[in-house]
Image (cartoon, rainbow, N blue to C red):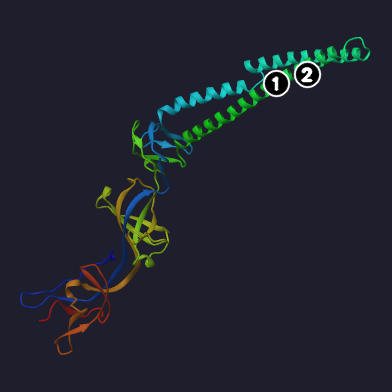
């Protein structure tokens, strides 16, 4: 990418010529501006490309192009239609699991009642076993009978403990199921939340790239929103020119959307990291004043890096090969003189040394 130089000339000197004599020009000072060329696109001053995080179907688009939106507003929903069904199933599973994990569940209530009855039976059998043990001590009953009563109490205790174990295991199992379904439900809700497209800035919907029912690939933009009346340029400057670009420099640019009209901006940001794919640096410029542009429109820009009000300039046709000019000598002979050329734009060339204002030069040797 080469520099583009712009010469702003306040008036043109009259070129004299005749059929036989070569054209002449009297050197004069005039304003000269030097600029660096850049290209890029125009974007809202603040904007966001809202993209799909994974390949999903566009279920809903809730805004229209050109609509004003507020921060946090839901703009669209991505996902799969089956997710709604899955969400309903998991919610129902969680409700049932919580119910079964409570004391009011049918199976839990049944086991609690059985355990309570088993406890009552154990208490009765234990009391009877102790009574028979006392009677056996008094020789009122046999030792064998007292032993049978003790074994019966032990069996009742085993039944009670078994029913209590079943009850505790049921509650633990249902609590694990509650946790499992809760995790599945949280993951699905998180997935749905990432698929809910919301506005993070206040502004305007500039573009809707996809329609409802279409599929958005991972990383593909779905909507573009941004500030409604403030814009900026996102430009690429060749690495050979970036050292001349500074914050605050003026930028003159044109965009195809407004052909023939020139706008101005000011350099506001220079990203100091080269883009290896094109050996360029990204530069941003704030467009002056409020206006209405078409985001992502291409722009051609000139970054003003030097402004000189009184520069000596001559028409490009008068500069000879090797950077020299033909001038009139003391004895009216035409001499070839070496000069130092500066800014040039094809038609006009700045002369930095070797020539003075008012000197007459020839387009070619007589």
Give the vertical position of 226 relative to 358 (above or below): above
Instruction: Looking at this view, name the residue that lies furthest to the left.
Output: 19
Name which of mark 2 and mark 1 comes first in the sequence: 2
The mark closer to the camera, 2 or 1, is 2
The image quarter in which residue 102 lies: top right
> Under tag 2, what secondary structure?
helix
- Residue 162 badge: 1
- Residue 154 badge: 2
**Of residues 309 and 224, which is closer to you in this image?**
224
Give the quadrant of the C terminus. Answer: bottom left
The image shows residue 156 at horizontal and vertical percentages of 76, 16
**Of residues 37 and 316, which is closer to you in this image?**
37
**Of residues 86 and 249, which is closer to you in this image?**
86
**Mark 1 surroundings: few (<14), some (14-19) or many (≥20) residues within 10 A:** some
The image shows residue 50 at horizontal and vertical percentages of 41, 41
The image shows residue 205 at horizontal and vertical percentages of 38, 39
Residue 127 visible, this angle: no
**Mark 2 surroundings: few (<14), some (14-19) or many (≥20) residues within 10 A:** some
Instruction: Looking at this view, name the residue that lies furthest to the top.
Output: 140
Q: Find the distance from the CA under tag 2 to the CA under tag 1.
A: 12 Å
The structure residue drawn at horizontal position 34% and vertical position 36%, both measured from the top left corner, is: 210
The answer to whether residue 335 is left or right of residue 143 is: left
């Amino acid at each position: 990418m080469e520099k583009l130089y712009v010469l702003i000339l306040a008036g043109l000197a009259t070129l004299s010529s005749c059929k036989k004599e070569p054209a002449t020009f009297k050197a004069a000072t005039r304003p000269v501006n030097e600029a660096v060329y850049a290209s890029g696109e125009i974007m809202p001053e603040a904007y966001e490309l809202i993209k799909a995080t994974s390949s999903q179907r566009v279920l809903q688009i809730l805004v229209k192009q050109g609509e004003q939106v507020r921060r946090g507003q839901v703009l669209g929903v991505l996902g799969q239609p089956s997710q709604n069904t899955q969400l309903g199933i998991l919610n129902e599973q969680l409700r049932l699991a919580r119910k079964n994990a409570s004391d009011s569940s049918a199976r839990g209530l049944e086991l609690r009642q059985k355990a309570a009855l088993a406890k009552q039976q154990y208490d009765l059998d234990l009391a009877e076993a102790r009574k028979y043990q006392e009677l056996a001590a008094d020789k009122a009953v046999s030792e064998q009978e007292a032993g049978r009563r003790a074994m019966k109490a032990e069996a009742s205790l085993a039944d009670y403990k078994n029913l209590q174990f079943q009850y505790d295991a049921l509650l633990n199992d249902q609590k694990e199921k509650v946790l499992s379904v809760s995790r599945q439900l949280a993951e699905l809700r998180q997935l749905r939340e990432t698929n809910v497209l919301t506005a993070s800035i206040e502004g305007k919907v500039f573009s809707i790239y996809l329609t409802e029912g279409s599929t958005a690939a991972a990383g593909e933009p779905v909507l573009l929103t941004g500030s409604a009346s403030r814009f900026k340029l996102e430009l690429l400057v060749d690495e050979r020119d970036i050292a001349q670009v500074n914050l605050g420099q003026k930028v003159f640019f044109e965009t195809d959307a407004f052909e023939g009209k020139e706008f101005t901006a000011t350099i506001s940001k220079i990203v100091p990291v080269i883009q290896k794919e094109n050996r360029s640096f990204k530069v941003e410029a704030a467009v002056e004043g409020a206006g209405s542009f078409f985001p992502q429109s291409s722009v051609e820009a000139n970054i003003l890096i030097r402004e000189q009000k009184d520069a000596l300039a001559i028409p490009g046709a008068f500069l000879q090969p090797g950077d020299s000019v033909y001038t009139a000598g003391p004895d009216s002979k035409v001499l070839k003189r070496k000069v130092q050329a500066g800014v040039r734009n094809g038609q006009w060339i700045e002369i930095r040394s070797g020539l003075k204002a008012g000197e007459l030069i020839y387009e070619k040797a007589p």
